[in-house]
Image (cartoon, coloured by chain):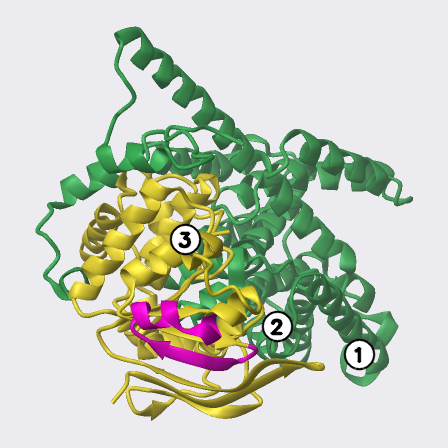
Chain colours: A yellow, B green
Amino acid sequence: MSLIEIQEIAKTYGGIHALDGCTLSFEEGHISGLIGPNGSGKTTLFNVVTGYEQPDSGSVRFDGDAITRLSPDKVFDRGIGRTFQLTRIFPRMNVVENLHVAAQRSGGFRSELSRWSSTSERARAKEVLDFVGLTRLASEMAGNLSYGQQKLLEFACIIIARPRVILLDEPAGGINPTLLRHLASRIRALNDEGITFVVVEHDMEFVMGLCHKVCVMHQGRTLCSGHPDEVRQDPLVLEAYLGTDMREADLTRSGAN
Amino acid sequence: MAVAEAAPELLSPAEIDRAFRDPFSPSKRTKATSWIVLLAVLTAFPLVFTNPAVTSIGVFTMFFLLAVVGWNIFSGYSGYISIGHAVYYGFGQYTVALLIMHLGITSGVSELAIVPLAGLAGAAVAVPVGLLVLRVRRHTFIVLTIAVMFIFQLLAFNFPSITGGSTGLNVTPPPWSGNDYNLPFYYIALGTAAIGLLTSWAVRRSKFGLGLLAIRDDEDRAKGLGIKVTRAKLIALVLSAFFVGIAGGLYAIFIGQVFPQFAFTPFYDLYLAVFAFVGGLGTLSGPVFGALLLGPLQQYFELQFGATTLYLIIYGVLFVVILLALPRGIVPSLADRYRTFLASRWRRAEERRGVEGSGVTAGSMIASAPGAAPAERGGS
């Protein structure tokens, strides 16, 4: 059974069908890629899964339980964390405080009255900062970090909470190749430890190199899915991305902005 | 899940402290000493300056201090700027006045003993008010808090059988005179303000308080990280209303009268907001500085130019000047400048020693990202 199962999700904004009966599933332990042209519904799908948007119809199941229409905090409590296309950090809090926002909120209100900076939690934060390579900036205001550093911080904020699934919305956008390789290696390392990933990304090299399985969306529906090599060859995909008669085109180059 | 579940590598607390220490932040001891010195100065003040005219300015300043510290627990940390805290202030005033009247309390000590109930009344009314106004954000929230405040003012005007309407209520003042009258109010307000500050400090270091700051910065993302935002905001509002309610209760006894237009007044909230802004919104010490600097000034202006409201213009100009010079308020802006100063001095010292920047491998790699900020950046 798949970890996340999305059934016939529809979502319209006025006359626009952002999601039009989208059905797909993501396997536990995989890094799944979600690609598709702009406006194909990828981010909307993330928003529906994580509770930021309410679908018009359809259902989302996580590990067998329906999580359709749960609020974002409840979805997070279930073990689904996400990042945003436009990186979102807490700019007027420092890096360590940013990390602690997400860490260990499961203990009810009594635990909320406890110090956020207890020794064990700080050890955990240090571990995560070492893991993404931001330890040196621990006491810096998050708003002062560069864009690439903010991406890493946003990522760190999610992993500190030990989710089962992490949804990454365009993690490669606007960061340099060195940092991108660093990020990919972190994703692989976490995946080796059993965390499931779903990655929305336009950088084809990144997606094809990282993902076990790639799913292509077009106009609010799933166009096809499969191993990266199969998807790369699929004529429907080429057509969706590039219009007709572009079979010769190199997806690797055209996808990356 | 190694990162996920492996036992945290056994770093000693000292090692973590070293990694996380902010090199440009004052030490704990410096901070604690400053607070103790400040408390000592405020405690000694009315004993040194014994002129009742001066101590009564001190009393009003302490009332403001107490209320603005309370206001900051909600508005400062959560970023929801309330211009409706006069609801809790007014509720505190009427609670005390009505209780004293109906219970026939006459001794000054028993009157003051009722004041905590004013805080509880403020906190209680904050629950329904909060459930209503916390549905909206930002500008709409500000407008809605003002609207609710005026509704309470109208209610106070229009239920004369309970509130006395526009003739107000009289509270028999305690039978003391001169400084014997002022000092109990001064010290009770100072003590409650100290409790308020301790509460504020406890909130700031708790996970609950961290959640409030996250709400201030990005509420939707905070929600996506598991924070129960509505509950957090409501609890902060209730805590905040408690202290403002006490300020109202003390004020009612001190002045001896309660009127709708002075209990539920927009000016009160403007003072609280301006004090907190000038001192530094959402910091522990900012509201204290704001109240201690501007509270006496407000009293002085009101005494000098009280007949007209022209002094409000001077006040407004002062507010604008401070915000232009120190846009984030006195405490954060000065702290930032101090950090910049220390950081540049530190960097110059490094250069003199001919040390290359502290080249941590991962860090320096990340610092090469486009538009990377220099690691030991200072202010702005």
**Tag 1 and tag 2 share a subunit:** yes
Residue assigned mark 2: B134
- Which label sits in the foreground, 2 or 3? 3
Alpha carbon of mark 1 to alpha carbon of mark 2: how far? 22 Å
Query: Mark 1 belongs to which amino acid?
Result: Leu
Q: Chain of mark 1?
A: B
Q: Residue B63 versus residue A239: which sits nearer the camera?
A: A239
Cβ atoms at labels 3 and 1 below 8 Å apart: no
- Quarter that holds the C terminus of chain B: top right
Q: Which residues are magenta?
A: A219-237
Q: Residue B74, position in %: x, y?
A: 54, 60
Q: Was residue A83 drawn as part of the magenta stretch in this picture?
A: no
Q: Quadrant of residue A70?
A: bottom left
Which corner quadrant holds the N terminus of chain B? bottom left
Tell me where residue A54 sits by quadrant.
Answer: bottom right
Q: Residues within 10 Å of mark 2 (few under 14, many from 20)?
A: some
Does residue A92 show up?
A: yes
Write down the residue under mark 1: B155
Task: Give, as a three-letter code, the residue at label 3.
Answer: Ala
Q: Is residue A205 above or below residue B236?
A: above
Residue B117 badge: none
Mark 2 or mark 1, which is nearer the start of the sequence? 2
Q: Nearer the viewer, mark 1 or mark 2?
A: 2
Image position of A199 with respect to B378: above or below: below
Residue A147 picture location, percent across and down: 46, 44
Q: CA distance from mark 3 to mark 1?
A: 57 Å
- Residue B305 falls left or right of residue B139: right
The residue located at (43%, 61%) in the rendering is A201
Q: Which residue is mark 3?
A: A172
**Point 60% across, 34% down: residue:** B50
The residue under the point 54% across, 64% down is: A242
Percent across and percent down for residue A41 are 53, 74
